[in-house]
Amino acid sequence: MRKQLLAKKNNPNVVILGIGNEVKGDDFAGSLAAKSIQASLPQQTGNFSISVFDCGPVPENFTGVIRKISPDYILIIDAGDFGEDAGEIGFFSWKKAEGSEISTHALPLSLFSGFLAAELDCEIGLLLIQPKNLSYLDPVHPLISEAVNKISSEIIKIFS
């Protein structure tokens, strides 16, 4: 991923969005990943400018600040049902997710991503964790916590 970004632009702006609802069990995964990455990754890392946001359950509230950053690449991290075992991690192009309901939120990620892509003319990737339980007030399942840790560690390693 690092080489791909540098091949396109010398000092790319990268935005990472974690999406999740802390009262809906595994749906909190994206927010947990964003919090972990924010705590460990500086905003300027070598040849990259990185902004990380914990968007909670309403990522569309962050479109104004994202526009100001004018990113070259956006990575969205969220829990999403893509038909695999709990804790599995899937990487999708927003274009391949178009028309699909892989999100656990009211606004499908394909619609939100399509809006950002059209507005900002940037690349967007969806990094999803297959949830096990989205019940109200349940804790995050250990398999999902493990996937969050794996994603956070890999992103920190890529951009450090």
Image: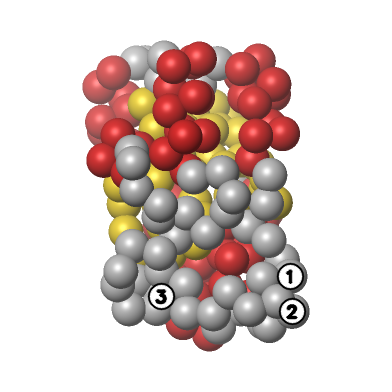
Amino acid residing under circle 1: Val
Q: Residue 5: x and y, percent?
A: 32, 28
Q: Specify the quadrant of the image occupied by residue 82.
A: bottom left
Return the x and y of residue 152 as percentages of the image width and height: 50, 59
The residue wearing badge 1 is 23
Q: Which mark is residue 137?
A: 2
- Residue at position x 72%, y 34% in the image: 61
Which badge, 1 or 2, is on the more N-terminal residue?
A: 1
Q: At which x and y percent is residue 106?
A: 59, 50
Quick check: marks 3 and 1 in contact, CB under 8 Å?
no
Who comes first in sequence, dot 2 or dot 3?
3
Q: Which amino acid lies under the numbered mark 2 shown in the image of this protein?
A: Leu
Quadrant, the N terminus: top left
User: Looking at the image, which is closer to me, 153 or 45?
Assistant: 153
The residue under the point 56% across, 44% down is: 107
Label 3 sits on what residue type?
Answer: Gly
Mark 2 or 3, which is nearer the eye?
2
> In this rendering, is residue 71 above or below 149?
above
Closer mark to the observer between disc 3 and disc 1 = 1
